[in-house]
Image (cartoon, rainbow, N blue to C red):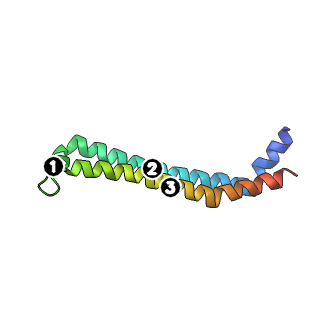
Amino acid sequence: MTPEHLESINNHPDFQQLIKRKRRLNGTLTLTMLAAYYGFVLLVAFAPGVLGQSLSGGVTSVGMLVGVLMVLLSFALTGIYTHRANTVLDPLNDKVKQECAR
């Protein structure tokens, strides 16, 4: 690829939109996971008694439920990313590749 060809791709409006959407999606999902994770760590650090409480008088504690919810959140965020990438980002990427291949 020549520098002129790379410059034309960088200046393409659909490529700019692709970058913007991808950054927004990645940032949102990353901040969501970081907030949940650090919230969990802060809960462990400053209120460990809350996590040790029994849910219904049995063996299962609040901490186990929160841990399972953290895993489910990570699966959900992965699913959201995959869905958005397949429905929004990939078609836009294909469009840029077709238009810039000419």
Mark 1 = which residue?
A: 59
- At x 86%, y 38%, the residue is 2
Answer left or right for 91 relative to 77: right
Residue 5 spot, x, y in % from top left:
84, 44
Q: Examine the image and state in which quarter residue 41 appears.
A: top left
Q: Nearer the viewer, mark 1 or mark 3?
A: 1
Residues at marks 2 and 3, CA–CA distance in whole angstroms: 16 Å
Task: Identify residue for label 2.
Answer: 31
Say whether disc 2 or disc 3 marks the residue closer to the N-terminus: 2
Expressed as whole percent of the image width and height from the top left, the position of residue 3 reads 83, 38
Task: Report x, y in % for residue 60.
Answer: 19, 50
| N-term-proximal mark, 1 vs 2 | 2
Which residue: 24% across, 42% down? 44
Q: Amino acid at mark 2?
A: Leu
How much space separates mark 1 and mark 2, taking CA atoms?
Answer: 33 Å
Looking at the image, the residue that sits furthest to the top is 2
Residue 12 is at least partly visible in this image: no
Helix, strand or loop for disc 2? helix
Single out the residue that lies furthest toward the left. 57
Q: Nearer the viewer, mark 2 or mark 3?
A: 3
The answer to whether the residues at label 1 and label 3 have Cβ atoms under 8 Å apart is: no
Pick out the residue farthest to the front.
59
Q: Amino acid at mark 1?
A: Val
Specify the label residue 51 is tagged with. Answer: none
What kind of residue is marked 3?
Gly
Identify residue for label 3. 79
Q: CA distance from mark 1 to mark 3?
A: 31 Å
